[in-house]
Amino acid sequence: MSELTRHVIVFESQPFWEPELQRQFLDEDVIVGACRSVKDLESRLARQSYDVCVADLTADVTGLLRWLGVRLDQSGIVPVIVVAREEQQSLEWHVRELGAASFTNEYVTGKQLAAMCRKQWNHQSNATL
């Protein structure tokens, strides 16, 4: 692993995005890990630095919204990409106001989600220049 290794944490109730992102980043220096609860997500973020968090809103709507609200007051927070169902569209602005970097409730492919992660990395790199 190099100093440029990227780390992605995926919060979802069942393995879906984690293995898909692992496939998308197969030829890149990216480590993708997963967690199944908000408590586990908080624990992992406290122990390790991640470049982006992909969160499936359907895994725990209430817990994820609560977590987003709490982390608003923290510095050095990881950008969060929220993936939701079409019927959760009404939560988009609430999620964004709580600090999510991106929100999608449309069907996205693994390739598109990987591109969303890269976009966040590029945004972070440009912000530190």
Image (cartoon, grey):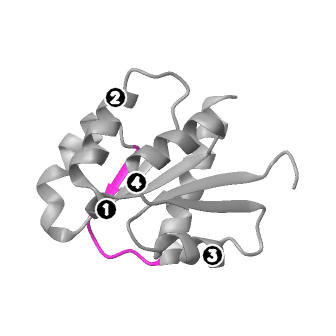
Left or right: 25 as drawn, with respect to 104: right
Residue type pointed to by label 2: Val
Separation of residues labelled 3 and 1 (CA atoms): 22 Å
Residue 37, label in figure: 4
Q: For the residue carrying disc 4, how many other residues have a C-alpha within 10 Å: few (<14), some (14-19), or many (20+)?
A: some
Residue 108 lies in magenta, yes or no? yes
The reply to whether the C-beta atoms of the residues labelled 4 and 1 are less than 8 Å apart is no
Q: Secondary structure at mark 4?
A: loop
Q: Earlier in the sequence, mark 4 or mark 3?
A: 3
Eye-nearest disc, 2 or 4? 4
Secondary structure state at the residue bearing disc 3: helix
Q: Earlier in the sequence, mark 1 or mark 2?
A: 1
Is 84 colored magenta in this rendering? no
What is the number of the mark on residue 59?
Answer: 1
Q: Which sits earlier in the primary sequence, circle 3 or circle 2?
A: 3
Q: How far is the residue under mark 4 from the one under mark 1?
A: 8 Å
19 and 39: which one is in front?
39
The main secondary structure of the magenta stretch is loop
Distance CA(mark 4)–CA(mark 3): 24 Å
Q: At 39% from the left edge and 20% from the top edge, which residue is drawn?
A: 73
Labels 3, 2: front one:
2
* SS at circle 2: helix
As measured in the structure, the alpha-carbon distance from the residue carrying label 3 to the one carrying label 2 is 31 Å
Q: Is residue 88 above or below residue 108?
A: above
- Mark 2 and mark 4: Cα distance apart in space: 16 Å
Q: Please name the residue that numbered disc 2 is placed on.
A: 70
Mark 4: amino acid: Ser
